[in-house]
Amino acid sequence: MSKRPVVLVVMDGIGINESEFGNAVKKAYTPTLDQLWETCPHAEIKAHGLAVGLPSDGDMGNSEVGHNALGCGQIYSQGAKLVNENIESGEIFKNPTWEGLVKNCINGKMHFIGLLSDGNVHSHINHLKALMKQAKADGVKEVRIHALLDGRDVPETSALLYVEDIENFMAELNDDNFHACIASGGGRMTITMDRYEANWDMVEQGWKTHVLGEGRTFASATEAIETYRAESGVVDQDLPGFVITKDGAPVGTIEDGDSVVLFNFRGDRAQEISLAFDREDFDKFDRVRVPNVMFAGMLQYDADLNIPYNFLTYPPKIQYTLTEELCKHGIREYAISETQKYGHVTYFWNGNRSEKIDATLETYEEVKSDVVPFDQRPWMKAAEITDKLVAAIESGNYDFLRTNYPNGDMVGHTGNFEATVIGVESVDLQLARVMKAVDKVNGILLVTADHGNADEMYEKKKKEDAPLKAKTSHTLNKVPFIVYGADVELKQDENLGLSNVASTVADLLEVAPNEHWNESLIKK
């Protein structure tokens, strides 16, 4: 048993960027973080690309893969990489689920719902193309796409590029025996892609748009996007829902005998719409009409809760997590965040498991997030999280405590620079309170981030006189790792990343790291 408690703070979306251009982290007043960086052992570690199991170092990290890596101390093939491998090998099309989807809609339509971009965080347009191509090869006659527009993991007004790309692809596929087209769509922060049950109205609006064909109608997705932009100047992620019609009728409502594939591979924003299709006892909103379809996700987004029942790609089987190892040694754990990141410090941290490893040793607390645009309240629930975390630290009931402050990421995604500065400052203010609590119990504080976001809020200008354009996606920057309260020396190695944190936590808790984990950041 450790004689000193260890507290881990994950500052979501706060990466390291030496440039001041669009850098809300540098712009913010952060005396606590500055003091920690200047006076404590620290290192810069990777939180993107190969270091977290993604296909290449050009792929930005995200909170899900980041917390998987933090919590299991290893690198697993994740998301896009996992799907890529299954598509390239053809395994995805040998899956009984795919065969069932094809058979089910042989006299109907196959629908693909998902984020239409190459952001590689929730989805990739190439995966959609591969599924459509195979659907045609397997005898499907009609395909409809329900396109969720990104502008968050890719440039904020890039939707038309992806619409043109997929429409050109479909034009090459279409012939006398096969027809594919876009049937509906809307911005990812307006319809369908809510997470953690924060705003079921989004999902209901998506259901009405995709399934029932209810909403404002247009002749094409391009017309819808251009019209909405001209009317309100709204960016892609906030575009209202739209329905494509021909001869006065929707071209792709979802009907009995159809098959539906949610081609997003990331789980957090895929679960709620999956439940709407999957559960007979669904009661979050009135679905009005529930078509008899076969529904499948690109992956199973929650294995413990079977969401969804059918899926095309098996998720990584994450073993030997930090929580499993600590439970073996009787280490008492506490995890807390607000709704937006609660699943990250629990489900994703524990290797995509909803259930606790040992309920007698683990305590989890969720602070309900506000259901408002985050740039309106950039402080979010940082103070409330800290109230509970400080009480837990000072209680003496826990040996390892962890939290996530979502501000740098969630406010950063809005593209509002000034609000993001306030969000970063809010985290810094609470970090000072955590430090005081750690001092009271003679504990050790670790401070890191799961990926960057607030550190790069503007797109790089292509022309000197070009107007500033918000960047709402994650970054490829490294993140800090700081140790406060322990006299240690950290390794400085270009290849170290989030997966090295588990062994580091174990070292500080005086527990031998699991043999499967990557090495500790602490020099022996």
Image (spheres, grey):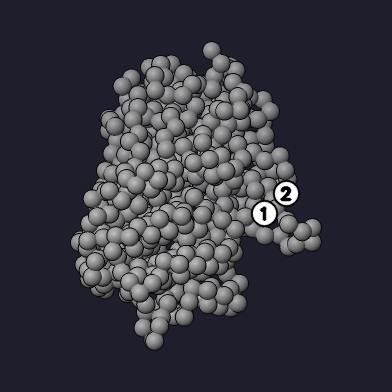
Q: Is residue 314 left or right of residue 339?
A: left
Q: Is residue 155 left or right of residue 386?
A: right
Q: Nearer the viewer, residue 355 or 274?
A: 274
Amino acid type at circle 2 is Phe
User: Which residue lies most toward the front here?
Assistant: 176
Residue 122 visible at all: yes
Instruction: Name which residue lies at 71% across and 60% down.
Output: 468
User: Which residue lies most toward the right here?
Assistant: 464
Q: Secondary structure at mark 1?
A: loop
Q: Local crowd at mark 2 within 10 Å, few (<14), some, or many (≥20)?
A: some
Q: Nearer the viewer, residue 395 or 256?
A: 256
Q: Nearer the viewer, residue 210 or 442?
A: 210
Mark before the other along the chain sequence, 1 or 2: 2
The quarter of the picture where the C terminus appears is top right
Compute the Cα span from label 1 to label 2: 7 Å
**Mark 1 sits on what residue?**
458
Instruction: Name which residue lies at 72% across and 49% down.
Output: 21
Q: Nearer the viewer, residue 107 or 2?
A: 107
Up-down: is 105 above or below 44?
below
Q: Position of residue 330 (x, y in %)?
A: 32, 21
User: Which residue lies most toward the bottom here?
Assistant: 247
Up-down: is 381 above or below 176?
above
Specify the label residue 21 is tagged with: 2
Q: Position of residue 15 (x, y in %)?
A: 61, 40
Instruction: Name which residue lies at 64% across and 52% down.
Output: 457
Q: Is residue 264 left or right of residue 456?
A: left
Amino acid type at circle 1 is Tyr
Q: Position of residue 25 (x, y in %)?
A: 65, 44
Q: Is residue 381 left or right of residue 342?
A: right
Determine whether label 1 and label 2 are within 8 Å by CB. Answer: yes
